[in-house]
Amino acid sequence: MKIILTILIALVLALQYRLWFADDGLVHAFRLKSEIRKQLAKNEEITKHNDFLVKEINSLKNEGGAIETRARNDLGMVKKGEVFYQVVK
């Protein structure tokens, strides 16, 4: 009877070791879930940025004022006949 009990205990311990520490065990599964959460957060951030860029592209394509505003603010362009004053702080 002791032999059977010893064999059963050894078998349970071997299976528990595989369950927790093998390449396909629970520790690996927990690590993968953590990586998935991080990747989903990163994907959401990138999706928001892409949505912003799509809106900006549509604005530049459809509205002439958006192009003018962009040229004035980003490139420092002025219209003919305008006087540009730069205030240095």
Image (cartoon, rainbow, N blue to C red):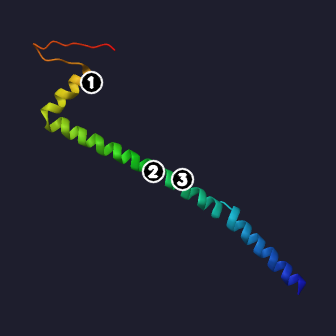
Disc 3 and disc 2 in contact, CB within 8 angstroms: no
Q: Which mark is residue 19?
A: none
Q: Is residue 53 above or below residue 38?
A: above
Dot 1 crowding, Cα within 10 Å, few <14, some 14–19, many 20+: few
- Find the distance from the CA under tag 3 to the CA under tag 1: 38 Å
Residue type beneath disc 3: Glu
Towards the viewer: 24 or 86: 86
For the residue labelled by badge 1, is the local secondary structure a helix, a strand or a loop? helix
Towards the viewer: 8 or 54: 54
From the image, tell me which residue sits under label 1: 74
Q: Please state if 88 lies on the left or on the right of 80 as rendered.
A: right
Q: Which residue is farthest front?
A: 89
Residue drawn at x 39%, y 45% is: 46
For the residue labelled by badge 2, is the local secondary structure a helix, a strand or a loop? helix
Q: Which mark is residue 41?
A: 2
From the image, tell me which residue sits under label 3: 35
Q: Please state if 24 lies on the left or on the right of 78 as rendered.
A: right
Dot 2 crowding, Cα within 10 Å, few <14, some 14–19, many 20+: few
Of the two numbered discs 3 and 1 in the rendering, the one whose residue sits closer to the viewer: 1
Question: Where on the picture, by quarter, is residue 67?
Answer: top left
Q: Which residue is farthest right?
A: 2
> In which quadrant is the N terminus drawn?
bottom right
Residue type beneath disc 1: Asp
Residue type beneath disc 2: Ala
